[in-house]
Image (cartoon, rainbow, N blue to C red):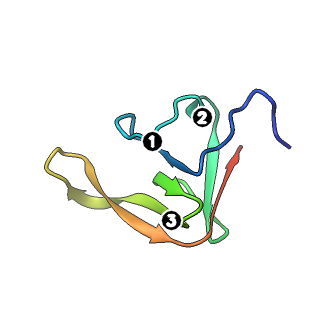
Amino acid sequence: MTDTNKPELPDQLSINPRSKFYVEEVFEHEIGVTLNGKERFDVEEYCISEGWIKIAAPKALDRRGQPLLMKVKGTVEVFYK
């Protein structure tokens, strides 16, 4: 069920435009991420081959005012919705 006009999903992707893993073409389409079979809606970054996602900590901020990211490990699956 691959649409020909959608780009290949990368192994590692970040929603932060300042990251080297940000790919703008992917975000033109809606994507979904599951961790251990459960869909997550709060993912900031993922890596399929290493099996982790990063989510924002609820209240903690770094010195630039960006939320601190926590790494959660498990089986990661990414798909287009």
Q: Amino acid at mark 1?
A: Ile
Measuring from the top left, give residue 8's x and y in whole percent: 69, 39
User: Could you give the CA–CA distance between mark 2 and mark 1, rounded to whole angstroms?
Assistant: 10 Å
- Per the image, the residue denoted by label 3 is 52
Measuring from the top left, give residue 48's x and y in whole percent: 59, 59
Q: Amino acid at mark 3?
A: Trp
Image quarter in which the N terminus is found: top right
Q: Amino acid at mark 2?
A: Val
Residue furthest out toward the right:
1
Measuring from the top left, give residue 4's x and y in whole percent: 81, 30
Q: Is residue 52 left or right of residue 81?
A: left
Q: Earlier in the sequence, mark 2 or mark 1?
A: 1
- Residue at the spot x=27%, y=52% of the render? 67
- Per the image, the residue denoted by label 2 is 26
Q: Are marks 2 and 1 in contact (CB under 8 Å)?
A: no
Q: Residues within 10 Å of mark 1 (few under 14, many from 20)?
A: some
Front position in the image: 39 or 22: 22
Q: Is residue 21 left or right of residue 37?
A: left
The image quadrant of residue 56 is: bottom left
- Per the image, the residue denoted by label 1 is 15
Q: Earlier in the sequence, mark 1 or mark 3?
A: 1
Q: Residues within 10 Å of mark 2 (few under 14, many from 20)?
A: some
User: Could you give the CA–CA distance between mark 1 and mark 3, rounded to whole angstroms?
Assistant: 15 Å
- Residue at the spot x=52%, y=30% of the render? 24
